[in-house]
Amino acid sequence: MTLSSDTELNGLDNPSFVGEDGSQYCSSQGCAAQSPDKGRGSSKLAYTVTDMPPWYLCILLGIQHFLTAMGGLVAIPLILSKELCLQHDLLTQSHLISTMFFVSGICTLLQVLFGVRLPIIQGGTFAFLTPTLAMLSLPQWKCPAWTQNATLLNASSPEFIEVWQTRMREVQGAIIVASCFQIFVGFSGLIGFLMRFIGPLTIAPTITLVALPLFESAGEEAGYHWGIAFMTIAFIVLFSQYLKDVPVPLPSYQRGKKCHFSAVYLFQIFPVLLGLSLSWLLCYLLTVTDVLPADPTAYGHLARTDTRGNVLSQAPWFRLPYPGQWGVPTVSPAGIFGILAGVISSMLESVGDYYACARLSGAPPPPKHALSRGIGVEGIGCLLAGAWGTGNGTTSFSENVGALGITKVGSRMVIITGACAMLLSGVFGKAGAMLASIPTPVIGGMFFVMFGVITAVGVSNLQYTDMNSSRNIFIFGFSVFAGLAIPNWASQNSALLQTGIIQLDQVIQVLLTTGMFVGGLLGFFLDNTIPGTQEERGLLAWKNNHSGEAANSQLLSKVYDLPFGIGTRHCAVSWFQYLPACPKRLPGSQRTDELKAAREDSSVKASSPRELGLGADTQL
């Protein structure tokens, strides 16, 4: 996606709202007249990264992003609960889910405000799950037999509480220590240095393999009731593709005017939220009428909305998670080395997510200082997750990057609102428990659409390369295939990879079973060692595309600079520009001339802040 001007960046020729006076919102016809690219209208955004949608849209779209991420946020604590000896303690499971919501909200706010500053959700990562389960499978952490028997278990007894909390504290300590490595890699600028050698043939297989290996989990969740899953898919596809250009007249009110109807492109903005809501409602109707089986062993039982009713009834109305709520974390080398492998995989995935998110949100590709800040803030997020005791770290959520491509709303204010929704759900236990009760097949159907979009975004990076070259075809094809085949073999033959050193075994197992790491590493190695011209490798078009967008430093500053004037109006000390996570400033005269030219250009192009995508509250 090449962005040539502010008008094109805003994507106003694919609007979502039509005002009667045309001053605040832009109609399809009007925008098409403004833009020379009207033939590409379907690819434009309703709101870009710096735009400020109306408050009610921010709330609804934020909830939609929360719901999109909720499947992963809920799945990780539930998977961990068995190894933590909590499979029969539903109340503690709900506390873990609420803690995950709360910490994910904090980490998302930190990332959007002070990290990479793109509209990207932070949440639990499956890259940390594998080494965590491996650590908890060690003989000293095996659950006592009496914790596996629901009739013998007293969840409120001090003995049982000590059993699961000692395991949780061990996991917390490993995550906290490993997160320090990620903080160093980010804020030292090491990630920015490595990006000199990372091009389209590294990014493409990495992003593609973020979603492709998830076909098994998506199919498994959808397979609990294929009818409900396909209905969810049909709703989302119907709303996002077939009805996206159909306006819905809704009553509205403007100061100085009476109540009137405005055309709102509702289906384009809320396809996921509408699809989930309708499928959830149908599951509820099928539950109360007993159409879905009540027998837990019967096919389709997990499509019922009351399968997690115990969580909803036992969860408290109000509970504030806090650091050290499970006790003081403990540290052991066995856990640290395994989690470090998860950190490496998570960082590589996040770099790919940043580029995909920038592409889908109408932002320039992130510069080195933004990448460094993003990885560093993710490390801080992992440290906070370890301190709070989620049993996991944090990373960028690929599912929500896919949601940007479907809704065509890339405003980071929407993500900030979604983060606030996660914070509230983490504090109000009943709300989190209710959201956690979405039927599994509904989430599986949603994953089908989301992961498909992410895969396509990864492949689209090949547009910069010469795909008539046998060299490039080999690198991409081999990297993707190896990224699927090697992890599959390693997961089925873990005994053959044992060296006798538990810590080393965990590192090898995690790295070789992470498809995006295997494919990305092979793509990186082959692209930098097999001879090829800059043009053939796509580096020329990649760099030209980046330099063309980076030439407008005002645009880069608006997207990636720190908020509230930090580093510009406030705390603008000269040595800030030498920090890897801070942008390098232009000489004063050059910057003044550029800002003056930008203002003159803006006054010619548009007459209102909405048309410019600027305004007093777009700089958050």
Image (cartoon, rainbow, N blue to C red):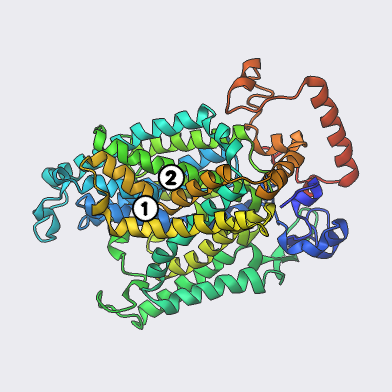
66 lies left or right of 20: left
Q: Toward which corner of the image does residue 256 lie, by quadrant? A: bottom right
Whole-Å distance between the Cαs marked 2 and 1?
A: 10 Å
* Dot 2 crowding, Cα within 10 Å, few <14, some 14–19, many 20+: many
Q: Which residue is painted at 39% across and 56% down in the image?
A: 486
Quarter of the image where the C terminus is located: top right
Residue 211 rendering spot, x and y as whole percentages: 49, 59
Residue 610 rendering spot, x and y as whole percentages: 77, 48
Residue 537 rendering spot, x and y as whole percentages: 65, 48
Image mark count: 2
Q: Are marks 2 and 1 in contact (CB under 8 Å)?
A: no
Among the two numbered marks 2 and 1 on one chain, the one whose residue lies closer to the N terminus = 2
* Circle 1: residue type: Thr
Foreground tag (2 vs 1): 1
The residue lying furthest to the top in this view is: 574
- Residue at the spot of label 2: 345
* Dot 1 crowding, Cα within 10 Å, few <14, some 14–19, many 20+: many
Q: Nearer the viewer, residue 237 or 546?
A: 546
Q: Secondary structure at mark 2?
A: helix
- Residue at the spot of label 1: 513
The residue lying furthest to the front in this view is: 531
